[in-house]
Amino acid sequence: MRSSSPSVATAVPPIEKPAEPAYAPIARLTLNGFRLWPAPGLQGTKLVDLSRRYFIVQHPDGMEQEVIIEIDPGLVGFVERASGRHLALDSSFWMWEAEHVLNNYLWIEGNVPPGGKLRITQIDRDDLQVATRWEGD
């Protein structure tokens, strides 16, 4: 009689997967099919150039492109004088404003800004009212 012993399988080491972000970025969707979200890697990091905000824009056809929103430093002083609030360039208000301006541009123009850059040099009345009531920081 032959004894059968269970075969011992050699342990296969687990395959290491690259770390995935803890959460998927929350994307804003325009009515004409563009999606936009802050560029990855910026959450929780200190911005090197406080006057720039980086976004990824996904075109309606699925192509993705980085877009840089530049905030004119003179606008910060204008907002402070007009609103009576000091909202420095590192305030979360400016990230909100950059996203809002980019969203409007994509909706109105139906395309990304030329060269992937858009400079904010003025603020509309509604956004100034938001600045007056901003509690993000």
Image (cartoon, rainbow, N blue to C red):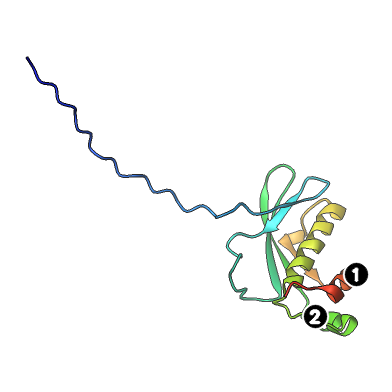
Q: Is residue 63 left or right of residue 2?
A: right
- The kind of residue on which mark 1 rests is Asp
Quadrant position of residue 25 = bottom right
Q: What residue occupies the far right of the structure in this picture?
A: 125
Q: Residue at x 23, y 34 (%)?
A: 9
Quadrant position of residue 51 = bottom right
Q: Residue at x 79, y 52 (%)?
A: 111
Task: Check disc 1: other Cα within 10 Å, few if <14, some if 14-19, many if 20+.
Answer: few
- The N terminus appears in which quarter of the rendering? top left
The answer for how far apart the CA atoms under marks 2 and 1 are is 13 Å
Query: Where residue 118 sits in the image (x, y, percent)?
Result: 77, 65
Could you tell which of marks 2 and 1 lies nearer the N-terminus?
A: 2
Q: Is residue 123 visible?
A: no
Compared with 1, 85 (above or below) is: below
Residue 33: give its label: none
Quadrant position of residue 47 = bottom right
Residue beneath disc 1 = 124
Q: Which one is nearer the viewer's eye here, 111 or 101?
A: 101
Compared with 119, 11 (above or below) is: above
Residue beneath disc 2 = 76
CB under 8 Å between callouts 2 and 1?
no
- The C terminus appears in which quarter of the rendering? bottom right
Q: Is residue 50 left or right of residue 9?
A: right
Q: Is residue 58 visible?
A: yes
Query: Is disc 2 placed on a helix, strand or loop?
Result: helix
Q: Which one is nearer the viewer's eye here, 58 or 85?
A: 85
Query: Where residue 65 sits in the image (x, y, percent)?
Result: 67, 54
Q: Which one is nearer the viewer's eye here, 50 or 110?
A: 50
- The kind of residue on which mark 2 rests is Val
